[in-house]
Image (cartoon, rainbow, N blue to C red):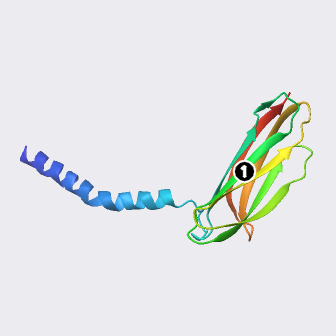
Amino acid sequence: MRVRTFVGRTVLVTAIVAAPGLAAGTALAAGSHAPQGLRASECATVTVKATPKLNTAMIPETIKSTVTSCATVTETVILRQHIAGPTKEAKVTITLSPGQAVTKTRSFPYSCCGGYTVTDYVHTTSGQQLAKAQASWTFA
């Protein structure tokens, strides 16, 4: 019984001592959005939304892309947007302060009928991909 209690306490003490180090590592990993090999000054996320999801009104599709910096310093990134189908790719250069979010809106003309997908890529100015997002809609 004493051995079991001693072992139980040792495990508990070890867990308590190790927990702060593990928690710090988890917080560091969770707070770091930059892919491996990139500096903290090269970090961004992207979201893209296409509305309406089902377009039956014969109106242009509205595509909103939001790029958010998770870098620790001001950075310049490139938002590249590709729509599957016979469209030209769009590119825009964006300079972001730490934590800043920039939203870009684009319209895609109605074209009956079918499903479309837009893919947004965020790259560093040297070409390394930082983020990717997709959205889909249907023209009916």
Quarter holding the N terminus? top left
Q: Name the residue: 72% across, 63% down.
A: 123
- What is the x, y in percent for residue 91? 82, 59
Image position of 43 (left or right of 85): left
Badge 1 is on which residue? 65
- What is the x, y in percent for residue 119? 76, 48
- What is the x, y in percent for residue 75? 66, 70
Q: Is residue 125 above or below residue 60?
A: below
Image position of 106 (left or right of 28): right
Q: Is residue 64 above or below residue 130?
A: above
Count how many numbered circles sit on residues in the image.
1
The crowd level at tag 1 (other Cα within 10 Å; few <14, some 14-19, many 20+) is many
Q: Which of the pair 24/109 is nearer the observer?
A: 109
Q: Name the residue: 79% across, 61% down.
A: 92
Quarter holding the C terminus? top right
Q: Name the residue: 34% across, 62% down.
A: 21
Image position of 19 (left or right of 119): left
* Residue type, mark 1 in image: Ser
- What is the x, y in percent for residue 20? 31, 60
Q: Name the residue: 69% across, 48% down.
A: 133
Report helix, strand or loop for mark 1: strand
